[in-house]
Amino acid sequence: MDTATPVPDTAESQEPGIVTYRRAVLDDVPVVVPLVESAYRGDASRAGWTTEADLLDGQRTDPEGVAAVISAPGSVLLLVERDGETVACCQLEHRGEAAYFGMFAVRPELQGAGLGKRIIAEAERRVRDLWDVREMHMTVITAREELIAWYERRGYRRTGETSPFPYGDERFGLPRRDDLRFELLVKPLV
């Protein structure tokens, strides 16, 4: 899990190069935070399709939150690099017979070119190999219908199980709406 795994790009990518995956370390925090922010918050995020700028202002994450993901037992922050430059990341966390998939961010200008599909497939393969889990879980804001549909096309199903958005906790952003909730999506990995 800790070694870089080279994967040649396919024709669906916008740029040529070699994509590698590696486990993030604390020295990567200053690269990960702006990557995640750029994919979800502010005007820069509008260059991609995963923006939450119409739903939330403020931050998506902070250095302390990223460092906690990197340092937590049973947690991996997987970095995706193209030609040595970080272009995406995702969190993988062992939770019993399941793994949790979160903090998924792809540079906005690279979104929509197939890289996300490849990353999620690699993440699923890694959690099966690393933890022998039977399911991948994730939570998505229910108002993100286009994103939920994208995950459904990857084999995830809506469970109808929701949890409240952490209103009042600015570490997760400043809501622009009062109806935000997370829904659990699940995919069998066996």
Image (cartoon, rainbow, N blue to C red):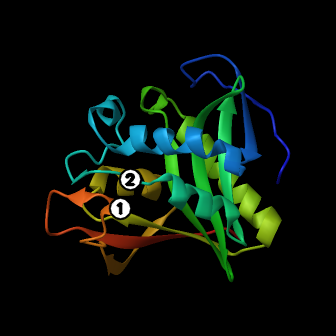
Residue topped by disc 1: 172
Q: Nearer the viewer, residue 36 or 25?
A: 25
Residue at the right extreme of this rendering: 3
Which quadrant: the N terminus?
A: bottom right
Residue 14, position as x, y percentages in the image: 53, 20
SS type, badge 2:
loop
Residue topped by disc 2: 60
Amino acid tagged 2: Arg
The residue shown at (72%, 50%) is: 25
Q: Is disc 2 surrounded by few (<14), some (14 to 19) or many (20+) residues within 10 Å?
A: many
The answer to whether residue 102 is above or below residue 45 is: below
Amino acid tagged 1: Phe
Q: Is residue 182 left or right of residue 133?
A: left
Which quadrant: the C terminus?
A: bottom right
Q: Is residue 88 visible?
A: yes
Quarter of the view holding residue 71: bottom right
The answer to whether residue 115 is above or below residue 79 is: above
The residue shown at (43%, 26%) is: 109
SS type, badge 1:
helix
The answer to whether residue 126 is above or below residue 167 is: above
Quarter of the view holding residue 151: bottom left
